[in-house]
Image (cartoon, helix red, strand yellow):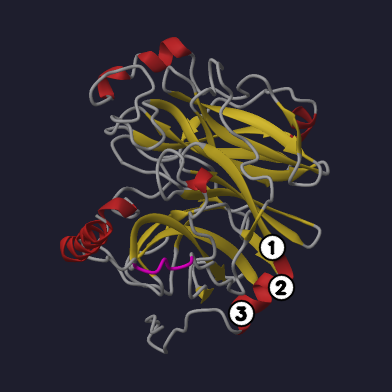
Amino acid sequence: MAALKKKKTVSNKKKAKTTFKKVKKKPVKPKLKKKSRPLDLRRALHNPVMSPTPGSYWESEAVFNPGAVMDGGRIHLFYRALGPDGISRIGYASSIDGVNFDYRHPHPVYIPEKAAETAKHHPYTSPARLTYNRELYLSGGGWGGCEDPRAVKIEGRIYLTFNMFNGWHSMRVAFTSIGEEDLANKKWYWSKFAYLSRPGDRQKNWILFPEKIRGKFALFHNLDKGDSARVHIAYLDELDMRKTPSQEEAPDPHTLPDHVVGWHNRTRSAAAPPIKTPEGWLLFYHAMDRDDPGRYKLGALLLDLEDPTKVLYRSSYPILEPDEWYENDWKPGIIYASGAVVKGDKLFIYYGGGDKHIGIAYTNLSDFIKKLVNNEHAVFSKRSALVA
């Protein structure tokens, strides 16, 4: 019996060897941390600094794409907010240090139209559904209202430019303004909004320079119309849509063909209003990487002080990429940096992440400019064509 039992054990072992194959496990590659580059912006440790307010009638779905301006020792943030009705309104928050926002207004500070007036536009939506709908309206989920404000201070007034959206067939740029004293006292006495772009023209993302140039308003309207050494600016005696560029003069960037410029092949829009430095106007912009399509990334330009249509330097790689969870929470791969201010020696960039949250990135301004000028820029040939 003992011998028989031993034989059975051996037989079972042999059977096991012939029935099952040993599978080698593939080695798990460690997740590599992205190598830091000299121009990369640093994110605030407690990002996102603002997120939707649950249960709010006006900002329960998203808070994002903020404009920013420095005035009275504080940084003032004007951000796009969306509630369940799908209408974009402007919210407000302020900070002393640029990172900790100790005041956030409980209600919208700017609505271009009353709800009844806004509802009259619904025949222009496609289709007409007066609710927050992420499937129909991929850009934030809103069907109407004022979107993506940019803020500048010119001669004692705060100007907000924004996109008036009333469905895919009605996208225009408009503006309003408020006095510095009213802003300081939180008296929201805005001027009646006026359009900058013309009826029937599909326009977004026009921005004002933060000062007049040669006595005129400088309106930035196109980043790239085929010549990577030039950007496009209109100089205006007054902010009047009858004097701004037509669709032919300022084509919608979405209709322009791809154009490989440095690290990107798809140039989208200017980001925050330009920042004046001794070396030139610093302008951030949105573009899409030819090797990583579908994601909004941030690039940097330095424009000539005397002739800001002339590009002096361009970053040779994106300086901020949508890699964090709050930059992919709803709409994946979105960084929309519509606000920038300088406080002391620090540059703060305020941006929308994933069309839902607000984040902050920052750097030392003088160091950033020095690196951009000296060794981290794309190179132009004598023929003004980008070669690297």
**Which amino acid is tagged 3?**
Val
> Could you give the CA–CA distance between mark 3 and mark 2, rounded to whole angstroms?
10 Å
Figure check: 39 above or below 196:
below
Q: Is residue 252 magenta?
A: no
**Which amino acid is tagged 2?**
Asp
Residue 153's quadrant in the figure? top right
Q: Secondary structure at mark 2?
A: helix
> Could you give the CA–CA distance between mark 1 and mark 2, rounded to whole angstroms?
8 Å
> Could you give the CA–CA distance between mark 3 and mark 1, rounded to whole angstroms?
16 Å
**Dominant SS in magenta:** loop
- Say few, some or many: other residues with alpha carbon within 10 Å of mark 3 (under 14 / 14 to 19 / 20 or more): some
Residue 363 tag number: 1
**Which amino acid is tagged 1?**
Thr
Q: Is residue 29 magenta?
A: yes
Residue 65 visible? The answer is no
Q: Nearer the viewer, mark 3 or mark 2?
A: 2
**At 53% from the left edge and 15% from the top edge, which residue is drawn?**
57
**At 81% from the left edge and 58% from the top edge, which residue is drawn?**
344
For label 3, the residue is 373
Q: Secondary structure at mark 3?
A: helix
Point out the stretch of residues depicted in magenta: 26-30
Q: Are marks 1 and 2 in contact (CB under 8 Å)?
A: yes
